Amino acid sequence: MIQIAILGLGTVGTGVARVVAENARQIERKLGEALQVKAVLVRHFKDGPYRQLMTDDFSKIEGDDEIRVVVETIGGVDAAYEYTKRALSAGKHVVTANKQLVAERGCELLALARRKNVSYLFEASVGGGIPVLHPLTQCMAANRIDEVCGILNGTTNYILTRMVRTGAFFSDALREAQAKGYAEADPTADVEGVDAGRKICILADLAFGRQTDPERVPMEGIGRLSLRDVKIAGRAGYRIKLLGRAVRLPGGGRTAYVAPHLIPEDHPMAGVEDVFNAVMIRGNATGDVMFYGRGAGELPTASACVADVMECLQASPKRDEIGWSPDAGGFEDPEKLKSRYYFRVEGSLTDAAMAFGQVEVLSEDGETAFLTDALSGAEAARQSRSLNVLARMRVLDSGSAGSGREA
Ligand code: HSE
């Protein structure tokens, strides 16, 4: 019997316990031994099916030599960081879905795991149930990765889909996403782009092999998005999606950011709806590869955690192909990236044309909505200075992970 412990019993922790129990036979067949949850760390004891396993004392888990894997689902950094370090130092494998901890401290924790000859695996931290980190670091290992671009937050994609399809109010759609277990404990992390930002940092870390400091990654969410822009874009053949992008720049630099984008309807990511996420990775040998699936929720996220638990126990020698240097140098401002821009301004087409030259008009009714040619963010800001800008978004062009028009 292989014993594991779960830290935290929220949506993901409960899902891990359920998957271990409900899929016990498949797991045993693959591992050659049964897997059992021996302890669950909680702050407050609650009645329920796991009552007998609960403890509020981490040192009992840390000192229990029978426990070989710790699944950390506490979230946040403080306690999760301390317990992860202690579990790794005690020679236990650690598996997590905690994107904040991985984005901020993953490189250091991975190095500690290597020193202790155990694994630190975090597939569930990006894309919920979608396998994306393993394919990126293993199956695409022979590529130079040039770009990663994705719909990385299930809550905001669910909200946008509900607003567009059924005209739901933002607050109602958010409440539904919370009730379904998609949203973070503090949903402002979802709405303001921070959750997607942590995930694009992790993807950038693994794609480019260098630390991406989340503090330097601009993160804009859907909080300021207007239904008016969604409708104008829809009539012109575009969908609006919150995207995270990490791009290798000519000359060896790299950049990353999160922001709403207009996506042409024929782009594979335009049809990704509800809680679904999609990640496109552009390798120099593969071209674009796309991963799609449920990006949040109890069982999809737990599925990725339990698969990592099984991998820790099976890997011999342990998986060690993740190249991730603590060196954060070479990160550049995403404003340097070129793309077409969508603008909605208070004013006429003449005002728009005076600022940008020729533009593609999408709507004119007192306000003017239009698309520019490809510009850097800095150029777009400078040229629009004379205009009263009501909305501004990048356009993601068809046919590539990101904008094929980029410099
Ligand atoms: N709150 C996250 C989301 C959960 O909505 O995508 C999965 O990381």
Image: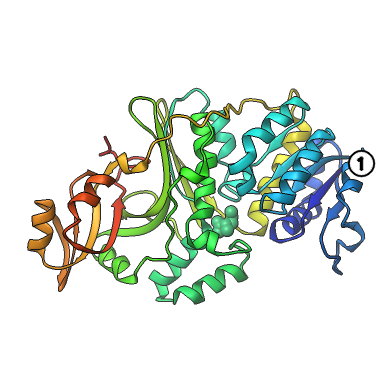
- Compared across the picture, whether 35 is left or right of 260 comes to right
- Compared across the picture, whether 345 is left or right of 252 comes to left
| Residue that numbered label 1 is attached to | 63
What amino acid is found at the position of numbered circle 1 in the picture?
A: Gly
What residue sits 40% from the left and 76% below the top?
167
Q: Is residue 87 above or below residue 222?
A: above
For the residue pair 31 and 76, the one nearer the viewer reads as: 76
Q: Is residue 309 above or below residue 273?
A: above
- Compared across the picture, whether 102 is left or right of 284 comes to right
Find residue 5 and report its horizontal and vertical position in percent: 83, 48
Find residue 118 and report its horizontal and vertical position in percent: 77, 30
For the residue pair 231 and 337, the one nearer the viewer reads as: 337
Q: Can you tell which quarter of the image residue 252 is in?
A: top left
What residue sits 68% from the left and 29% below the top?
111
Q: Is residue 241 above or below residue 319?
A: below
Is the CB–ligand 1 distance for label 1 below 8 Å? no
Figure quadrant, ligand 1: bottom right
Quarter of the image for the N terminus: give it. top right
Quarter of the image for the C terminus: give it. top left
Q: Can you tell which quarter of the image residue 331 is in?
A: top left
For the residue pair 108 and 126, the one nearer the viewer reads as: 108
Q: Is residue 291 visible?
A: no
Check disc 1: other Cα within 10 Å, few if <14, some if 14-19, many if 20+.
few
Find residue 261 and report its horizontal and vertical position in percent: 34, 54
